[in-house]
Structures are given as C-alpha cells and as structure tokens.
Amino acid sequence: MSFNSFGHLFRFTTWGESHGPAIGVVIDGCPPNIEISPKIIQAELNRRKPGQSRFTTQRQEPDEVKILSGVFEDENTEGLRTTGTPISLLIENKDQRSKDYSDIKDKYRPGHADYSYHQKYGIRDYRGGGRSSARETAPRVAAGAVARLVIPDVKIRASLVQMGKHKIDYNNFDWEEVNNNPFFCADKEAAKKWENYLDGIRKNGSSIGAIIEVVAEGVPAGWGAPIYGKLSADLASAMMSINAVKSVEIGAGIDAASLSGEENADEMRAGENAPYFTSNHSGGILGGISNGDAIVIRFAVKPTSSILNERDTVTTDNENTKIITKGRHDPCVGIRAVPIGEAMMALVLADHFLRHRGQVGRDGAFGFEK
Amino acid sequence: MSFNSFGHLFRFTTWGESHGPAIGVVIDGCPPNIEISPKIIQAELNRRKPGQSRFTTQRQEPDEVKILSGVFEDENTEGLRTTGTPISLLIENKDQRSKDYSDIKDKYRPGHADYSYHQKYGIRDYRGGGRSSARETAPRVAAGAVARLVIPDVKIRASLVQMGKHKIDYNNFDWEEVNNNPFFCADKEAAKKWENYLDGIRKNGSSIGAIIEVVAEGVPAGWGAPIYGKLSADLASAMMSINAVKSVEIGAGIDAASLSGEENADEMRAGENAPYFTSNHSGGILGGISNGDAIVIRFAVKPTSSILNERDTVTTDNENTKIITKGRHDPCVGIRAVPIGEAMMALVLADHFLRHRGQVGRDGAFGFEK
Amino acid sequence: MSFNSFGHLFRFTTWGESHGPAIGVVIDGCPPNIEISPKIIQAELNRRKPGQSRFTTQRQEPDEVKILSGVFEDENTEGLRTTGTPISLLIENKDQRSKDYSDIKDKYRPGHADYSYHQKYGIRDYRGGGRSSARETAPRVAAGAVARLVIPDVKIRASLVQMGKHKIDYNNFDWEEVNNNPFFCADKEAAKKWENYLDGIRKNGSSIGAIIEVVAEGVPAGWGAPIYGKLSADLASAMMSINAVKSVEIGAGIDAASLSGEENADEMRAGENAPYFTSNHSGGILGGISNGDAIVIRFAVKPTSSILNERDTVTTDNENTKIITKGRHDPCVGIRAVPIGEAMMALVLADHFLRHRGQVGRDGAFGFEK
Amino acid sequence: MSFNSFGHLFRFTTWGESHGPAIGVVIDGCPPNIEISPKIIQAELNRRKPGQSRFTTQRQEPDEVKILSGVFEDENTEGLRTTGTPISLLIENKDQRSKDYSDIKDKYRPGHADYSYHQKYGIRDYRGGGRSSARETAPRVAAGAVARLVIPDVKIRASLVQMGKHKIDYNNFDWEEVNNNPFFCADKEAAKKWENYLDGIRKNGSSIGAIIEVVAEGVPAGWGAPIYGKLSADLASAMMSINAVKSVEIGAGIDAASLSGEENADEMRAGENAPYFTSNHSGGILGGISNGDAIVIRFAVKPTSSILNERDTVTTDNENTKIITKGRHDPCVGIRAVPIGEAMMALVLADHFLRHRGQVGRDGAFGFEK
C-alpha cells in the first residue's frame, strides 16, 4: 500500500526530490549474511550516472552511496555482511544549480508531470521536477545492486534495441558490445549509426524515444505466483513505474497478436535432466510462473519532454503561454534506462525468489525426481 | 502480498479452479451505501460468458452469480445496498465434463501453464488448466461490475482493435458498434471481415492473437500515486495479469519510441475552467497521475494455445511425445478479453479513487480555485 | 491493507454476516502438497460450535465446512492435497431464526458494535450483529485448522484460566483435562466449581468475563521479524481482533510491571545441543523473535453484552429508551474463545514460519554449528 | 509485509542500529499541504531524549532531526508544507562510545534479544543491541510528531500510572502534572514517592517495570475497520511493537474478565446532537470501531534487562558463564515509553483516519442527520 515502496519480501522504499539535500532508499527483508560493500553498489550507480557522454544530461552528480544501516562487519574478513535488518542507502544531491525556476514555477511543462502533480496535491516542488524527476531512479539502481546479490546465479543484462525508428539487427547481437558504446547497445553497427543520428537530435534541441530489452538468464522454473502476483504482472508494473515508460512486452509481446497458436506456443523436448523449449515466445513465463527459459522483457521509453523548442502551454492560472525548457537534459533518456531496467528486473526476481522459497520451501523447481 | 488479491483500498481476492465445484471472489473495502443487485453484476458476467457465438468456447456455463455477503436491504426501497463489509460473490461451475483427462495428466500442453505450475508446486490440478484456466476471469468481471458502481461518473469501454495482422480503421471507430458484432469491435467494417477470417482459423483447428483497447473517460486529474503506485504501473500489472496477455501500452505506447519530443509531448491550452491537452499521446497519465484526459490502454493477447493440430511436447517423465489439445476452446481468446479488460480498468480506477480520497481528502483535483 | 484479511504469506480473508446465507474464508499462500480433508477442519470447527452445552448459545448450527478450491486428489491415496492455490472454505448459515428484529433495528444495544458500525458506514445489517457477530470466528477456526497442518511440529493448546474473579490453580494444571469439561479448563477442580457459578449467572440472565491462556510448544528460535512484524505484535493484533477481547499479555505480561530486572530476565544455561532458559517470563519471545521456549499468551474476554436485564440506551433517532437483548447467547463467551485463540495462534505462527523461511532460507534457527 | 514498516495509508518505515552512523524513518502517504517544521518534530523528540534526568540513561544524544524530503516552501510564508511525497527524517548517532564490546560479543545478555536475533539471522550487530535497541524508538517519535499534524483535532496524552507495584491514585489524576516531574506522571503525589523509590533501585544497579496509559480525545465515531483492521487490534500491535512491552489493555482491559455484562456494557443516553455513553469500559472502541468516546489504552513495560548485578548466561558456544551488563541504562525504561506510546497512538489514528476517509468519503461519522 505504500505508494513509494515496491516488492513484498524483498521490499524497498525510495524517497527524495531532484533538488532536495539527498535521495535514498530503504531495503527491507534482505536475507542476512550476504557479502556487501559500498563499492558493489557504486559500480551499478556509476552506469546510470549522468554526464558520462555527450548523449546524457550534463548535470554532474558523483552519486556517491552511503550505507547507513543493515550491515555489520564479517567476523573473519574485513568486509561487510547484511544482517537481515533494513539497509538504508543515501545519496547526496550535489549539483542542484541555484538557477531561476520562476519559469516552470508558474507554467506547466508539456509532457511533464507538473500539471498532474499540482492537481493531485495542490502543491508541488517544481525544482527540476521534484519527486517526478528521473533522479529518483538512482536509489532504484542502488537497490537493484543489492537485489543482484540475493540471486547470484541469475545473470541480468540489457541493451538498447531501438532508438527512434532505428532498430538493431539481432544478427549482430553480442552482449559483449553493450559496454563498448555510449548507448548500452548490443549491436555495434547500430550503435555506430546512432552516434550521428543522436548528435543531430541533440543539436536541434530535440529528443527521441527508445526501446530497451532486458534478459534474465538462470531463473529456475517455478518463480512467480498466480494470479495477481504473476511474475509477468510484477515485471510489467516494475518497468512501467520507470519514468517515461509507455509500453511493456514479454517474449513475443505485441507481435503475439499476429501469431497463430501453432506459431506462438513453444514446443517442448526432453532434455537430459529436464525438458526444454524449442523456442521462447513466452519470454520465459507461462501462467505467470517462470518456466526455466530466459526471461525476456522490452519496454518503450518516450522522448524526453524537456526540449529547447518552444511549445504551447498554460500558466497555473489557466492562461495561454509558451515555454522553452532550458536546462541540462538527455536527448534520449532511454539510454540511461538500460541499467534502470536491469535493476528493476533484479528487484522483481529477488522478491519472487524469497516469496517462492517462503511458500514452497525450496529455491527452485520441484524438478523431475520421483 | 496475497498472491490472489489485487488492489489496496478496493481489494478483491479470487479463488477457484476450472473444474472445481465453484469459483468466486471476495471484495473488501467497498464503500457503503451503494445500490447493488445481482442483476447488475450478471449483466457484465453475461458479456464475458462463453458460448455466445461460434467464435468462443462452446462450454456452457450459466455463470449465475450469488451475493453471499456485504449487502443489506435498503430501508426505503426493495433493493440492496453495500454495507462496507466484504462482498462475497460465488459462481457455480456447471459444465465440467467428465471427460478423460489422462492425456493432459501426463503431458505438458505447449503454451499452457501446465509445466510451470507443476514445477512450482510439485502438484497440479490438470483438469482444464485448474487455477490457470481463463475461467478465473469470471470472478474478475463480477468484481469489476461492483467497481464500476464505485466510480459512476467514469465511463469505461473497450474494443477489439486488431485480430491477427488485421487492424481496425480508426476512422470507422464508433463505440455504438461494439455490441453489434460478436467481436466487441468498434469498427463494423473490420468486424465484418473478421467473421470469415476467424471462421477459417476455427475450422483449421487453429487460433489467433488480438489487441484490445480500453478507454476510461471522466477520470479527474489527480488519481494515481507515484512512484510505485503509479496509475500506469497498476494498470500494466492489472492487464498483464489477464491470461494470455503479452504486452501493455499506454497512450502512444510502443510508438512513443519512434517519436520526437515535439511530436510526443501533449501541448496545453487554456480551457474555460481548466486547461486541456491538444493531443493525448500520454494516454491520460503524466508522472503516473491522471491528467483529466481519457485513459487509453492497449494490450495484446496471444493466440489460444489449445489447438487441434498435433504439437511436440514431453511427458511428466521427461520423455518426448505428441499432443493434440481436444476440448472446447476459443479460436481467438482475445474476444472475451474485451469485457475482462474493462473490468480490470474499473478495478484499478476504483482503488485509486479511494486511495486518492484517503490521502488528499477530495474526490478529484485541487483545481484552479485560488 | 485488506480490512478483513490477516497474515502475509499465509494469509486469510473472512467474509459473511450472522444472518446471511453463508460465511467463509479464503486462505491464500498455503504451501502445496499438504494432506488435507474436510474432516480435519470439521474437527476444529466442532470444538467452537455453539449449542454443545448449556453454557453456550443455543443457536443450532451444524457448521459444516465445504472445501471449494485449492485442493486436489493425491496421486496415490484417496485423499486430498493442497495445491498452493487459494483454499476457499464455506459454511452455510442454517439457524437464522426469522424473528422480529424491530427492537434492535431502531435501538443500539449497549456494549455491542451497533452504534459504531452505524456511525461508520451509515447503514448496518442489524440481524444478529451482522458482520460484528461472533459467528465470524467460525471461518477463523476453519483457517486455523489448515494453519496447523503447515506447522505440524508445533503443539498449540489453550485453557480457560479465569472466569469472573475465579482463577484456576496452576498447581492443578493438566492439559489432559481441557476436553473433560464444558469450559476447556485445564484445572478440573476449578471447572467443577465454575459449573454452579456459571449456572447462577445464566439463570440470572447475566454474563461474565474470562481469561484464556494459549501455549505453543515446539516453535524453533528465530520466528518473528522486528520491528513491526514482531511475533508478539502480530499475536497481540491477532488476539485483539477476536470479538470481545480487551487485553493481551505475553509471558509475565502485566505482572512484568511489578518485577525487577533480576526477577524478570530469564537466565540461560548450556544445554546439550543448545542453550535453554531457566524461566520463561518472556513468554518465549525476545525482541519480537521466538527464543525456542514455549510461546505463552493470555487474553481477557469481556462479558457478553447481550443480557436479559433491562438497560438504558438510545434509539437511532437519539432518543432515550430501554432495551432487553433477548435471543440465544453465551453466558460466558470466553469459553468458545478457547479454540478461537488456538486458531489465531496457529495462523500467526504459520505465517511467520513462511516469512522466516522466505527471508532466511531455513525453517528454524541457525543454531550452533560453526 | 515490510517487517520494519507500520501503517497502511499513513505508513512509516524505520531503519538504523544503536551504534550505526544514523537512524531514521521514511513516512509515506502523508496528506499534502500540512504546515510542518523540524522544530515541531524536535519538540517531541526532546521528550523521549535520553539523559534528561538521573532516571534515564546517561547516553548523550542531541537527537537532532533533519527533514530530507517531502516538504516544500509555502508560497506565502517562510515555512514548510508537506507535498504528499515521502518524508525522510534522519537522526545522526553521536554518542556511540568506542567501548569494548567483547563481553556481549560472545555472550547472550539475559532478557535481551541477543540470542533470538543471533538464532534468526546467524549474524548480529551486538553493539548496544543493534537493531533491537530502544534507540529505534526515536524515529517512531519523530514520525508520531508528523502524525499528530494529520489529526490536529485529536488530543493525545499519556501518563505513567504504575511503577513496580506502586500505582497512581486516579483521584489525583491531573494531565497538567505530567510535565512537572521526571516520570511523565499525572499524579504528583505518586511522582514524589517514586523519586526515592527509583533512586533506590538505580543505586542498587537494578531496574523495575511500569505501566503507561495513553488517552486520545476527540476521535470521532467511525474510525477503525473490522475485522482484522480493528482499531483495537492495530493499537495492540502498535504498543506491543515497542521494546519491552509485555501487555496491552483497552478500556477495562484485564479487569473486564471479572465484570458482569451489566457492569461492563456502557449504557447510552441521548445527548444534544448525538448519544453519549455513561461510562467508558469499552475504552472508546466497540467492534473495533471508535464510538466517539476517549480511546484509552494501557501497556506494561518490563524492567530493563541491563542491570549491574551478575547473571547466569551462556556463551555463543553454548558454554555456561556469567555476565554483568555495564553501560548506560534506564532504571525504569517505562518512563521514556510515555512519549513513545503517544507517538504510536498518533500513528495508528492518523492511518485509520485516512483509511476511513478513503472508504467512506468523510472524516468522521455519518451522524444523525436523516
């Protein structure tokens, strides 16, 4: 019921505004005795951090994470371990420029949450979007880094697979390439072309949307809990909660609408120890429960609404006006959504792992032992 | 945390299997003093009911709903009113054929949840899919009928907008047509063509996917609660929890990936009492909060996995085999998903209405009074 | 958040009114593969059932339970097993007398929830107390019977330990006696005296309060989750949710106020495999977590408010009047609270067992292996 | 489901250990537009703060609270207002002495949570009790200060009413006296006597238990939600979650066991605008719902387990040993439980206010308008 919490057994709560003193997250329900360090969390945060290339916002934030609770020194090593109590992570805001906000104070920026927040609460922190800022995703990524430690056998990776109308070629898909270009793109040919493309958009003061694909390998069959705790439903909620996300697809996704039953239903064959599927249109989830295959999810991110071109809007007094959203923004906010999508995948899976273990008493599937 | 519950203040829990004695739902948190009757609920159930045309399963279920609790006689009329206590609705299963299930008892049907349920729980009710059967959606529709009563000023309608590769023409879109064809389709021309198309598929023993669009009008600005209680996130979870759904889109949805910031961000103009948006790429939701515009959501439904053509699969002993899924099935299960999508929309909105009212103390937006 | 649900991983939702067609409970999150039968549940229900002696209400209810979902035939035996899906239990109301309720329709019964329900909801089902009736405890007892199956190694027993001012003598305490008298009292001497005492009260048309002690043995160290999921906090909530309960004590309870630190803190000694406590003032719970000792809880039940003696009250129009609550009532409603207290203990423990297992990955404590 | 969260619509999550860098709380769901300031919160924190008299622990903590999020400048004043987003409050730990913890590192302190935490998690932060320390109550008190702002018409006060065997005389009861003595005691005569009494205990290195009474006036009829969201059940859980609490009583409490129906059930009389009760054995709650009378709750706090007298215990290797708990401790920890009890009352009531408003659409009761 908490509006700013997500998950059930592995549950996190984020707080903080774009221009407040700090942002953070409290993780509750983490299993004890897991090796942890600020460094592990920092590594993930650094991937999301702004200002790393000309293609992301130039706001300079070190995004340095502090662990305030929930860990204790390992008896034998110099390291830290989780204690099972809440883990509080804090990131100070450093680069809140003392710029003049009078423009957005009295106007609603098109495509932003200014209007809806104001209507809901009757008050809004207009500085940089306040709570609706993408800055809120830093704590998610920090929490996601902890979640990964809970499910060490699951490998979670993501790639930008479309920018504007330009899709990657899946024949070129190579996970190794993701960290070799500023787009987290697994297709190095596409990434090369996108540089010029996005430069053009950036120089025009415009922006463009994107699609991200997140894949989790190593999830055993059996995670996810029908009917309203379906793995697919929780993943959809998780991805749709990311700023600017407008669609979520699992496996064949929207294309499943065009398929016949013969084309879509994944056939099975006997494997050495367990059956396997000859295709993965299901995206690794059947009836809301993982089937042992890779979990595959894609989500579309709309173009940044902050653009340098003048737009029609209204004042908070309902009078017509124009607005140009100056400031430091991402020409393709989808790029930084890549590590965020990974984090949300890790957070959903860690939670479902614990839920499954709680109800069923084992980590994975019942398997084929008779 | 309940796996089989949905919602927070307006919360429902469904139970029951395809071939058990009954299925049902308990609705908790419904406001008191709302006029209600079995007839109102039955009307919605009848829209989802199987066997209404040759395009849906021939299983014959009267789907007669009984209200077992949570209502009391109105002091002045002969009618019933909600009392604020849990409303228990029960629907008996009538047409569970005593057919031989030995085939699916020992084999996993491709595209079905047989395998994942078995792996998760180590036991499964294989009769008709058990808990994973679409029969579970009847209680949702019943609950949705109650949810509609909680938000009488919101108009919720849905249409099939794509069957297989065949999309409707939005120029023909007319809500009045939805009830004039067996597909709940707002484009009568498309509906006409689909009859032959689906007949062909049906006679081939095959099946096809579809896309449904659900629209809610009359939602005031202010519903939905960031960050993890976003209206969009809860709608995504709601729709993705429906059997066979593989994608969810809000507003421009997946197409937002291809748009520029100028194309996508909806501009505002001063209206008489409140601003309005000159377009609705946002699907009525900004920052997870309704903006007063129509809420627009689409979801893709995969083709029924139960088809008459032989498929490869394995036995529960991990041996290769073949399977034909006989029985009574929907050639396009997306058709009956139309009233289900409406129900889920109503259920999400009723919950968010109460949540908003709880936190903020008003039904709608703060508005423009100063 | 559900008002009518309790528990987290092992979670149940009750519904129904005293004079509706039926009452029931839906249990969600039960582990799969547990042997179950209507008979096991019925045995617990029969202990709570009214009309078993002259000391409980004469309402005649068979309280026959039906299992509507969540179970499936065992592959090898003729019995049933849980499937991991929601277990819906239904009990029909049979003995709702068509008596004239006009008296309580327009008046508030002192000590009853008539007034507070009416003020909260603006409408109330006045027949027999509607939702506030002790009839709601039948579904709890049914759910508790299922909970016991989840924690078969835990032995849960309860005894009436005080009726009015008359306390039992703990020197006579013998669990074997509990089922030998109509009071579920472990002290057969006290039970003998109470017969005459309660007969007097009954014949006077009066009623009397009582105290119940519930003990759970076999709970390993480690269940319960600080800070707000303390085993003690959840037990307090569970017992206080029972109709007419006005106090809850754990271990030394209220007497702890009068003790010194030396008297109260339980000392420890080395046992063969694990330490043990030389006393149990803690009631088996330290810091909200079980310590391996017996869990001991007591709760006080107020006297039935339905009495045959005339009382002052007001009408629903705020006019002074008098009332006599006729009907079939318990002279000491605390008696039937004994199996209810056991059920609530089982329900809390089953939930905490699963929660502990989910977070920590083992059923019990880490123990002393190094 | 969060272990470290409490409440539903007004929900808070605490984090932090006794000797970590800081402790804190995140409050989610607070209504917007409420005037707030660090000063208001600080005032409540200062009442709980250690080291204010010789009767509480000498640990010196300024307990200075920082508001990190969820507030924004008022348009018209210099003050702050809540924005409806999460309010993060942080309190740094200042006086964690770098003392040698080797004694409690390897031994379990009797009456403390050392053993149960260790058994549950397999690891524990032994410094000062870690998460089980009463230091966790500072964030509760901070959250309670915010909760009070949500229900400004409700007056919440508390008094120590028993220390050891010494009860106050209710004839002397005067709320004005509570702040005139170091015990938060409404009976100045009792407070006078307790000084010597507690000095004796303190000098002996011993400790003593206590009982606290918390009263909330101004709660309208209608708050609280049966069956498992009863106001009484949530209050019981809230109070039992406070460190060292062993019993909770509402209204007549444990004495209700000794009363007859005539003595216990509060009669009603017609008032000018609404009925009133001629007594308050119910403690202001009937059927789990407030009845408009004062809410009265009492809870017993066990004596501090940290005492200077040697006790028997075991090592973490299950070997017999002795222990003396040195350090700075409260001879009667019940004293500082007084503002904590008030805070928990405020937190429960604020939550139930919002829940009631959400479901029913009004702040208070339906009342007598027809």
Image (cartoon, coloured by chain):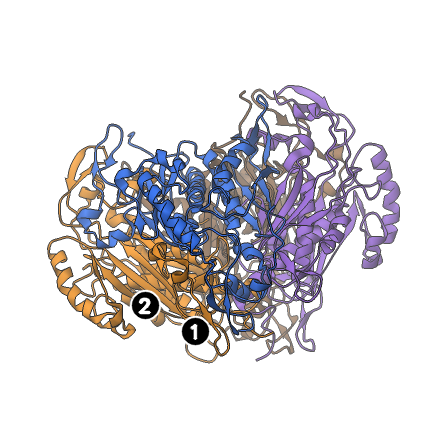
Chain colours: A brown, B purple, C blue, D orange
Q: How far is mark 1 from mark 2, CA to CA?
A: 17 Å
Label 1 crowd bin: few (<14), some (14–19), many (20+), radius 10 Å:
few
**Residue at x-position 55% and y-position 65%:** C118
Residue C201 image position (x, y, % from top left): 40, 53
Which amino acid type is marked by label 1?
Answer: Asp
Q: Which mark is residue D44?
A: 2
* Residue C12 vs residue D252, the one in the foreground: D252
Q: Quadrant of the C terminus of chain A?
A: top right
Q: Residues within 10 Å of mark 2 (few under 14, many from 20)?
A: many
Q: Chain of mark 2?
A: D
1 and 2 marks on the same chain:
yes
Within the image, what quadrant is residue D148 found in? bottom left
Asked if residue D118 lies left or right of residue B106, the reply is: left
Q: Please say if the residues under marks 1 and 2 sit with CB atoms less than 8 Å apart.
A: no
Residue A25 visible to an observer of this rendering: no
Name the amino acid, label 2.
Answer: Glu
Up/down of D135 relative to D44, above or below: above
List x then y, in percent, for residue D313.
19, 39
Question: Is residue B179 left or right of C67 when viewed as pictured?
Answer: right
Q: Nearer the viewer, residue A254 or D150?
A: D150
**At which x and y percent is residue D208?**
20, 55
Whether residue A2 can be seen here: yes
Q: Is residue B125 left or right of residue D353?
A: right
For discs 1 and 2, the disc positioned in front in the rendered view: 1
How many numbered discs sit on the rendered protein? 2
Residue C350 spot, x, y in % from top left: 44, 39
Q: Please, what secondary structure does the residue beneath circle 1 have?
A: loop
Figure quadrant of residue C84? top right
Q: Which residue is mark 1?
A: D153
N-term-proximal mark, 1 vs 2: 2
